[in-house]
Image (spheres, rainbow, N blue to C red):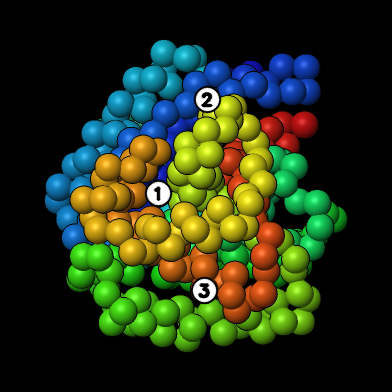
Amino acid sequence: MRFAVIDIGTNTFHLIIAEFVNEKFELIYKTNVAVKLGEGKINENLIIPLAFDRGINALKGFRKTIDGFNVDRLRATATSAVRSAKNSQDFVNAAKNEALIEIETITGEEEAELIYKSVKLSGAIKDLSLIMDIGGGSVEFILCDTQSLIWKKSYNIGAARLLQQFFKSDPISDEDKNAILFLIQTQLQDLFEICEKHQPQILIGSAGAFETFAELIIIKNNQNISIENIKTYDFNYDDYIETTLRLLNSTHQQRTELPGLIPLRVDMIVIAALLTNYVLGRTKINQLKLSTYDLKMGVLASMIKSIK
């Protein structure tokens, strides 16, 4: 049986196709398109026409691929940019009519639950952990241990939102940094309270920006590791801090020249570094791990479970 999952994110649309045989699944295809659905007016809760068209065209391309693989079941989930947009129903209707893809717009709580399932599937959870997923529109946090999900929440402080609202300098100024940090401090108060109570020892970053941090470190250290072929990666904390400080102090042009940094993340990685470093500091966590499994793998796991 073949399953396809489409993850309609604020920055990137992902497609994975998996084959499920003899109680095991194997990924047989994956791709992504930097759609930038939240471009321009995400803080005004609007998908602008250019982004709208890019999104529908990406979905049309995905539909051709899915048909070519003779997929049995498809699930397409949309997150922050679509769920918060005033014209979200227009986008959902266009996807159905033009790309023959029915979109399920999930809540922030559902998104966090699926991220937890994906990270658990990767084998990254070995202890009391705080999972962090930095999207373009929202950031999800999940407190969990090897047995259960303890607490979860989604916050509308994604990298694209903060970038459009606050990132006005090059390199980012102390004024812009402080504005972002003030908002983070205000928004995440309940997160810090729950972490103070449970005291997780490790932060697990779900794919996205954390893959970029890992890629930069792997290249710098000449490590023979391919992010494409691993499920988890343990960061050296000093390497991580050094890398993020370099990003925070660099200009846009300097970041474009860094091997391992894709164009979509050249500026958003600065926001991701600020967010992550602040959370690490407030929670007093000094262990950091990457899970390359994110939302789409959680969706896949749920689809497979539903047929068992």
Residue 278 is marked as 3
Helix or strand or loop: what does disc 2 sit on? strand
Q: Quadrant of residue 174?
A: bottom left
Q: Quadrant of the N terminus?
A: top right
Neighbours of disc 3 within 10 Å: few (<14), some (14-19), many (20+): some
Alpha-carbon distance for marks 3 and 2? 36 Å
Q: Position of residue 229 (x, y in %)?
A: 59, 27
Q: Amino acid at mark 1?
A: Gly
Helix or strand or loop: what does disc 3 sit on? helix
Mark yes or no: residue 135 visible.
Answer: yes
Q: Quadrant of the C terminus?
A: top right
Q: Amino acid at mark 3?
A: Tyr
Q: As drawn, which residue projects farthest toward the left?
A: 49
Helix or strand or loop: what does disc 1 sit on? loop
Mark yes or no: residue 3 visible.
Answer: no
Q: Is residue 62 above or below residue 231?
A: above
Alpha-carbon distance for marks 3 and 1? 24 Å
Residue sitting nearer the eye, 266 or 188: 266
Neighbours of disc 1 within 10 Å: few (<14), some (14-19), many (20+): many
Residue sitting nearer the eye, 42 or 243: 243
- Asked if disc 3 and disc 1 are in contact, CB closer than 8 Å, the reply is no
Q: Amino acid at mark 2?
A: Ile
Q: As drawn, which residue projects farthest toward the right?
A: 147
Name the residue that disc number 2 marks: 17
Name the residue that disc number 1 marks: 9
Residue 98 placement, left or right of 201? left
